[in-house]
Amino acid sequence: TEEYIKNLNENVFVNYKNKPQLSFILINNLPANYPVDNYTIDMFNEYGVGTKEENCGMLFVLATKSRDYGFEIIRVDEPSVSDEIIK
């Protein structure tokens, strides 16, 4: 949920060395002829996921009607980040 992600970013990940940020984008469909991997990277950069100082973040894109998804991770060095996400 939105509150869960907000809590991770503001209360958990802020204590990590690289201060990673987790973001989600939910859309109905990807733009025409736009591979999900390219879209995910472009949105990662457009929205500035992660702090400017650390450039560290994770973005999950889900296109619900077309059933496409992508996950981009930039410089997340903490092995326990994935553990926090799946709790």
Image (cartoon, grey):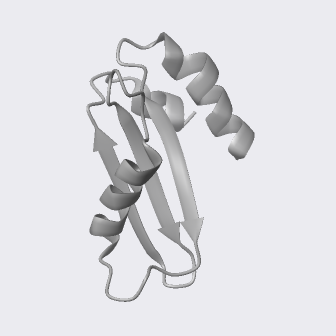
- At 42% from the left and 33% from the top, the residue drawn is 50
Which quadrant of the view contains residue 60?
bottom left
Front residue of this view, candidates 76 and 33: 33
Q: How many numbered marks does the figure carry?
A: 0
* Quarter of the image with the C terminus in it: top right
Front residue of this view, candidates 41 and 52: 52
Residue 24 in the figure: left or right of residue 46:
right
- At 33% from the left and 50% from the top, the residue drawn is 72
> Most extreme residue toward the right, as rendered?
3
Give percent across and percent down for residue 66. Answer: 49, 84
> Most extreme residue toward the bottom, as rendered?
32
> From the viewer's perspective, is residue 58 above or below residue 14?
below
Residue 44 in the figure: left or right of residue 6:
left
> From the viewer's perspective, is residue 61 above or below residue 27?
above
- At 43% from the left and 49% from the top, the residue drawn is 59
Residue 19 in the figure: left or right of residue 4:
left
Give percent across and percent down for residue 47. Answer: 47, 49
Give percent across and percent down for residue 82. Answer: 42, 34
- At 51% from the left and 81% from the top, the residue drawn is 29
Give percent across and percent down for residue 28. Answer: 58, 79
